[in-house]
Image (spheres, rainbow, N blue to C red):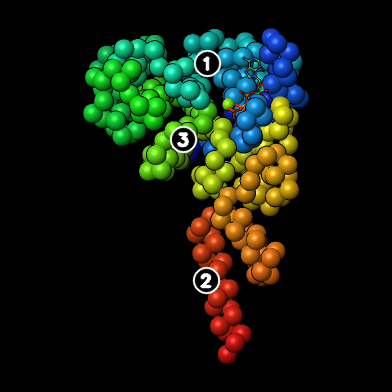
């Protein structure tokens, strides 16, 4: 296991202005540690995609700098960067370009200089991992939106990067797809030590999969912390136009309105179940 405390990407006081003068990011600082599963949360237009494109070197900050293992991103060779930090874009149509699924996924590993048998093996394995083993010869144009998302993910998996940047990787996936992709990402994170950085507004996924998260609001960083740190401050979360995980919201209502004795608001169904079962047991005991 790699050293989890080592910073892998450091964002130092980044601002980014688009050519039409929209301020996409405003004075953002952040350290992402090696091997963590990090998430960036924020409402539409908060700056998530802009921050991810700064982190992978696609956009150059207007001011401030980004360090990858202590080296300024702008000083690193683009090919080196794109094979170590790989991105699944928000819109699969921005990412896929080849005729067939196999050609598309092969492109990255070929560019990394891998020999053909290794490329074929990686493509096969990546397709199996995303549940699309049968689709290798399919035309990209014939795929559904959710299938395209899976192929984008497979393309990145085939490159075996150190850092995976994922912009809303679960959008457009069916419920089983969401949980299988998230479990796959978590497994790769834990077993292969790949650092995951994921933008999302699906707050319910956060407590289950994420180590730390940052909240963005109108281009500014509002708070960084563990899911417990963040969701124990509901007014900050709502101030960023986000919400608590559904189960936490229910327990918050039960606490406030129905005076249920909950000390710490549970964030997952598992934690909520344990809290409720304990409360029922306590009430039974008190009644005796
Ligand atoms: N190419 C562009 N030109 C001008 N402004 C842009 C451009 N791309 C994004 N912006 C603006 O920058 C701000 C941040 O946008 P960004 O796409 O980073 O938000 P986001 O958090 O990813 O939103 P979403 O949840 O909708 O994906 C928004 O105000 C957006 O309108
Ligand atoms: Mg976005």
Q: Residues within 10 Å of mark 1 (few under 14, many from 20)?
A: some
Taking the image as four quarters, which one is ligand 1 found in? top right
Q: Earlier in the sequence, mark 1 or mark 2?
A: 1
Tell us which disc is closer to us: 2 or 3. Answer: 3
Tell me if residue 85 can be seen.
yes
Q: CA distance from mark 3 to mark 1?
A: 25 Å
Quarter of the image that includes the C terminus:
bottom right
Q: For mark 3, what is the residue? A: 170
Q: Count numbered badges in the picture.
A: 3
> Which residue is pictured at 58% across the width and 12% down the height?
76
Q: For mark 2, what is the residue? A: 277
Examine the rendered structure and indicate whether residue 239 appears above or below residue 273: above
Horizontal side of residue 114 vs 162, given as left or right: left
Dot 2 falls on a residue whose secondary structure is helix
Between 98 and 114, the one lying in front of the other is 98
> Which residue is pictured at 66% across the width and 69% down the height?
258
Q: CA distance from mark 2 to mark 3?
A: 32 Å
């Amino acid at each position: 296991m790699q050293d989890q405390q080592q910073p892998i990407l450091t964002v130092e006081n980044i601002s980014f202005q688009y050519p039409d003068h929209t301020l996409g990011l405003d004075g953002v600082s952040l350290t992402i540690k090696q091997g963590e599963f990090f998430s960036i949360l924020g409402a539409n237009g908060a700056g998530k995609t802009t921050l991810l494109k700064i982190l992978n070197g696609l956009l150059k900050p207007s001011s401030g700098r980004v360090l990858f293992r202590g080296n300024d991103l702008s000083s690193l060779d683009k090919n080196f960067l794109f094979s170590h930090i790989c991105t699944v874009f928000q819109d699969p149509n921005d990412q896929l370009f080849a005729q067939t699924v196999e050609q598309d996924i092969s492109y990255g590993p070929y560019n990394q200089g891998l020999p053909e048998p290794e490329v074929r093996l990686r493509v096969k394995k990546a397709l199996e991992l995303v549940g699309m083993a049968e689709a290798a010869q399919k035309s990209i144009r014939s795929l559904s939106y959710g299938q395209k998302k899976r192929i984008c993910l497979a393309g990145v998996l085939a490159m075996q990067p150190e850092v995976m940047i994922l912009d809303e990787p679960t959008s457009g996936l069916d419920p089983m797809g969401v949980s299988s992709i998230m479990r796959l990402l978590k497994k790769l994170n834990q077993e292969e030590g790949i650092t995951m950085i994921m933008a999302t507004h699906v707050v319910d996924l956060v407590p289950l999969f994420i180590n730390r998260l940052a909240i963005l609001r109108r281009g500014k960083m509002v708070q960084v912390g563990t899911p417990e740190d963040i969701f124990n401050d509901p007014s900050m979360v709502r101030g960023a136009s986000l919400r608590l995980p559904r189960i936490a919201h229910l327990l918050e209502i039960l606490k406030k309105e129905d005076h249920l004795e909950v000390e710490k608001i549970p964030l997952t169904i598992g934690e909520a179940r344990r809290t409720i079962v304990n409360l029922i047991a306590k009430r039974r005991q008190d009644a005796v």
